[in-house]
Amino acid sequence: MKQNKYDDDTFFNKYSNMDRSKNGLEGAGEWHELKNMLPDFKDKRVLDLGCGFGWHCRYAVENGARSVIGIDISQKMLSEAKSKTKCGNIEYICMPIEDIDFPEESFDVVISSLALHYVKSFEDVLVRVYKCLSKGGDFVFSVEHPIFTAQGPQDWYYDGKGNILHWPVDHYFTEGIRNAKFLGEEVIKYHRTLTTYLNSLIKLGFEITGVVEPKPAENMLNTVPGMLDELRRPMMLLVSARKK
């Protein structure tokens, strides 16, 4: 059974009140870096894995994409995406990322934002992405950084007065399930090393074209609570690759 935490009313309401949920791409601390890694969307067929509220789907269309399919396991997420979408060349499909099975070379671009650390087998998803991506097509994704996912609980280490001391990293080379805390709720995530992320792409025939450990946007550092602490360790990993 694939995890569908986002259809839980309590969790979804908390997620909906995050800055990145209310303000879209400009509310995402990594967006200033991720958008520079995206390819030219003009006349491209695009697949978004774990599309959420559909922000990246709409961005692709606004920048010339011919068609976009957004995949998400959550009906609540897709309902919100549909309510925000006015153009007709975006289709939203409710299904797990792990179950995609599109015909060969169906898409020119595949993107995924902060979703692949929820899937059990990254390699299996890569096989499916490689199949449906056209030759020379681009795959751009973001995940939580292995430094961020390694220990599990995903919280700082504090002193007796509640001050942040450091970010704990433990069991880094032990890949697999982590019972993480996100928005005060327990969520299952999957930890993988940086080696696994990058070598899996190479072994399947992708050419890696970019790797970024993004710092928060400058304009957020002093305006968003807690954002300065994001300079103390990487929270996300952004990767762009191309099918040879």
Image (cartoon, rainbow, N blue to C red):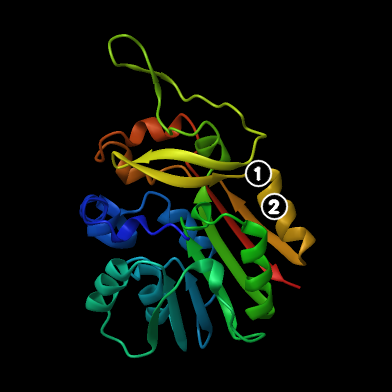
Q: Is residue 13 above or below residue 181?
A: below
* Left or right of 133 in this view: 162: left
Which percent across, then down, holds residue 131?
68, 77
Measuring 27% from the left and 10% from the top, which residue is drawn there? 161
Q: Pointer 1: residues within 10 angstroms few (<14), some, or many (20+)?
A: some
Which percent across, then down, holds residue 9?
22, 56
Q: Element type at marker 1?
A: helix
Which quarter of the figure has residue 207?
A: bottom right
Q: Report the residue that reaches farthest toward the top.
A: 160
Which quarter of the figure has residue 193?
A: top right
Please name whichever residue, 243 or 168, is drawn nearer the observer in this view of the structure. 168
Q: Is residue 102 above or below residue 207?
A: below
Measuring 54% from the left and 60% from the top, which residue is drawn there? 141
Q: Report the residue that reaches farthest toward the front.
A: 1
Q: Label 2 belongs to which residue?
A: 198
Report the amino acid beneath label 1. Answer: Leu
* Left or right of 37 in this view: 62: left
Between the C-alphas of marks 1 and 2, the distance is: 6 Å
Is the residue under label 2 in contact with that under label 1 (CB below 8 Å)? yes
Q: Element type at marker 2?
A: helix
Q: Which mark is residue 194?
A: 1
* Left or right of 144 in this view: 90: left
Q: Is residue 229 above or below residue 14?
A: above
